[in-house]
Image (tube, rainbow, N blue to C red):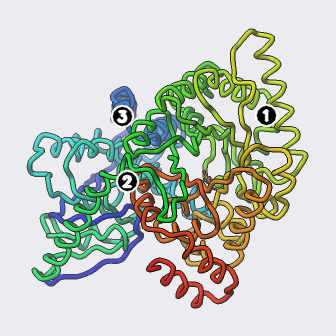
Amino acid sequence: MASFTLHGIPVSRGIAIGRAHLLASAALDVKHYLISEEQVEAEVQRLQNAIAAVHQELQAVWRELPPDAPAELGAFIDVHALILSDPMISEMPLDIIRSRHYNAEWALLTQIDELSAQFDEIEDTYLRERKNDIQQVGERVLKVLTGTASTLAGLASSPDSTAHMIVVAHDISPADMLQFRDRAFAGFITDLGGQNSHTAIVARSLDIPAAVGMYNASALIAQDDWVIIDGDAGVVIVDPPPVVLEQYRERQARMLRERKKLSRLKKTPAVTKDGTEITLLANIELPQDCAAALEAGATGIGLFRSEFLFMGRAGYANRLPTEDEQFESYKMAVTAMKGRPVTIRTLDIGADKPMDNAEETALNPALGLRAIRYCLAEPQMFMAQLRAILRASAFGPIKLLIPMLAHAFEIDQTLNMIEQAKAQLREANRKFDPQIQIGAMIEIPAAALALPLFAQRLDFLSIGTNDLIQYTLAVDRVDHEVAHLYNPLHPAVLFLLSTTIAAGAKAGIPVSVCGEMAGDTKLTRLLLGMGLREFSMHPAQLLSVKQEILNSDLTVLVPKTRKILRLMEANAINEAMEQLRSA
Ligand code: PEP
Ligand code: MG
């Protein structure tokens, strides 16, 4: 067979080489037939039994989640449980059996196709991607109905054969991804999915090369074909000629050697050639992630996205985490970090991170009642979180970080509520750190442009470049159709970043960057040249960034960065960035 190349969306870095293992879509095997009136109730019962079996299956996956499972997985399983309980899945197909006399599989598939079509109409990319969750749940039920064993179960029994296996599927559910994580599989390719699909998020947190959004890869690639995934470029090469295979093997070996070498830097202090100390912190989603942060040599947590404790609880858990539950999670994180600072960001729910049980009514959720706006509108819930964080501060150094602030009155209202929470704890004789530091995310352009409002009121600032870019350029960060406009090197973004860092230094208030820019080695020197001294990123990125820092000389970088900040044209900026990287 001739070699061919497919292009999709890169979601998880690295190179994977192996033989294709195709995961069949259960939907393809479904039988369609009409049943008689007498068979209707038996058919209804058959479908109800299958739904109940999948409920149990999900509960079992939930119970067996290893303590170090990626933060998002529990939430994903809950989303699937919730979908399964929804009358759209649990009742409507039963009506179809009764009214149209379809067999159970056909009735379920009809309903899923109907729902999928409705989801296709939705403009919001994130919501549109949830169609995949519905299809994955439907496939689970179909598998039980058709008696097909889980498509992954067979793989689980033969570890050796999967050593160089590339999974190729129309789609993979996050729960199924979990079953892959203990296996030595090399990478995965899916037809569906975007940068922000659940499966992509899990792949990134597992650090497995992956490419998604490959359209009909699962139809074009045959079982056991040799496949190369270039996870950095989103390119898949099928049946590569020997010379290409050899090149990629060399590249892969080189990357592995480099990563191994990097691990030696774990204890090396992050100091530039001219002797400037840099602080490298980790971003985490759940307290369990502290282990990876320590393993990477992080000197603290720069961003604990506390919303992951709140998301996906509408299924089995069925409620928001209580003050005590939150307290235990925050305490677990600060204890795990053994005296290193832990920056806990208060609930940043909304936009692309909806709470499952929150009805999304905003016309434009990214500009709606998200993050601190939502918290100030829900004072009871916010006070419970503040008390939980404060209580945990008795067990180690905690900093409080507030997302999405823009107005002075929002800062004042938040500070007031923190004081109230402290007063309540004093009254209840609960211990906390009375000197707890309070900081703001700078992620709305208005905040960056009115920085004195923040510097006068707060102890530290953390720049959220993910949102700062989105709001500065008016580019939805999860919409692949405008992804080409999402440019961290736009002069307006560079202006806001550099002026915020400089203003922080002038006011004597620490400034960090905790958005994705902090973990991108292509940007490390630029940020150093702007004066950034504190970087917070995913643990997997930390040692590469450290290496870049060790090779940097600020006396060279600062003047070169100043020149870049005066440029306006993209070509000139890109050229100057190349020079900066080789400086
Ligand atoms: C950011 O906006 O850069 C950030 C760190 O927060 P999040 O990605 O959670 O919105
Ligand atoms: Mg943000």
* Amino acid carrying mark 3 in the image: Val
Residue 6, horizontal then vertical, whole percent: 31, 77
Of labels 3 and 1, earlier in sequence is 3
What residue is drawn where x is 67% and y is 79%? 565
Q: Residue furthest right?
A: 409
Determine which quarter of the picture holds residue 310. Answer: top right
Query: Pointer 2: residues within 10 angstroms few (<14), some, or many (20+)?
Result: many
Residue 74, horizontal then vertical, whole percent: 45, 36
Asked if one can make out residue 42 in the rendered structure from this viewpoint, the answer is no
Give the number of callouts: 3
Query: Pointer 1: residues within 10 angstroms few (<14), some, or many (20+)?
Result: few
Q: Which residue is mark 2?
A: 203
Q: Residue furthest front?
A: 274
Q: Locate ligand 1 by image quadrant.
A: bottom right
Q: Which residue is mark 1?
A: 378
Helix, strand or loop at mark 3:
helix
What residue is drawn where x is 22% and y is 40%? 147
What residue is drawn where x is 80% and y is 58%? 447
Of labels 2 and 3, earlier in sequence is 3
Ligand 2 has an atom within 8 Å of the beta carbon of the residue at disc 1? no
Q: Which residue is mark 3?
A: 54
Q: Is residue 41 left or right of residue 79?
A: left
* Amino acid carrying mark 2 in the image: Ala
Say which of 88 and 441 sits in front.
441
What residue is drawn where x is 61% and y is 30%? 397
Check if mark 2's residue and mark 3's residue have beta carbons within 8 Å.
Answer: no
Task: State the separation of the CA atoms marked 3 and 1.
Answer: 35 Å
Helix, strand or loop at mark 2:
helix
* Amino acid carrying mark 1 in the image: Glu
